[in-house]
Image (cartoon, rainbow, N blue to C red):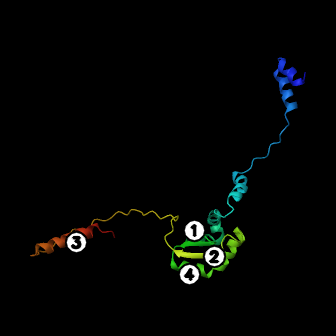
Amino acid sequence: MTRREALARQSVCVRCEWRYREALMPTRRHKAPEQIGAAMQPLLDRIDREGHFAIVRLAKAWPEIVGEAIARRTEIVSLKFHTAVVKVSGAMWIQELNLMKSQILARVTERLGDDVVRELRFVQGRLSRRERPKLRTVSRATRKSIELPELKDPELRKAFERLIEAWGRASR
């Protein structure tokens, strides 16, 4: 009869049973906790062999690559066939960024790798992520009513009344 069978037949105290389990089970060493991003990165790299997540990496790195002033006025729109399309807030910025294109491409290549972005294309458009300032409400002073002189034509009088009414509602 083996030791295992003997213990199974006997009523063994809890402490003895624990010692028995420790003898049979190998001890495991526990790894230190790891951040989920670091743990998921090898898996994402394996899944993303075609580079579909490159636009996400580019969008996250964009403010560091171009700087805060340019990042506030630009937005990564798409990445197709190694060409990054960047939406820009104005034509003046497009001109400036076209002059800086080689420097920006060098920084992108240094940060993301050689084969992610080969060309940059700047297009003008409204930025979607930009916060719009909230408008403050300003109290309006009441306008004085205007007395119309006596007009013989009733249609002309109605037209002037509508004009004065619209002028009273208009913002200043």
Q: CA distance from mark 4 to mark 3?
A: 45 Å
Q: CA distance from mark 2 to mark 4?
A: 16 Å
Q: Residue at x 71, y 55 (%)?
A: 43
Q: Earlier in the sequence, mark 4 or mark 1?
A: 1
Residue 161 rendering spot, x and y as whole percentages: 18, 70
Q: Is residue 19 above or below residue 135?
A: above
Q: Residue at x 18, y 73 (%)?
A: 160
Image quarter hosting the N terminus:
top right
Instruction: Give the number of the disc on residue 95.
Output: 4
Of 32 and 13, the residue lying toward us = 13
Dot 1 alpha-carbon crowd within 10 angstroms: few under 14, some 14 to 19, many 20 or more: some
Q: Nearer the viewer, mark 2 or mark 4?
A: 2
Q: Nearer the viewer, mark 4 or mark 1?
A: 1
Q: CA distance from mark 3 to mark 1?
A: 49 Å
**Could you tell me which secondary element the residue under label 3 belongs to?**
helix
Instruction: Give the number of the disc on residue 78.
Output: 1
Q: Nearer the viewer, mark 3 or mark 2?
A: 2
Q: CA distance from mark 4 to mark 1?
A: 20 Å
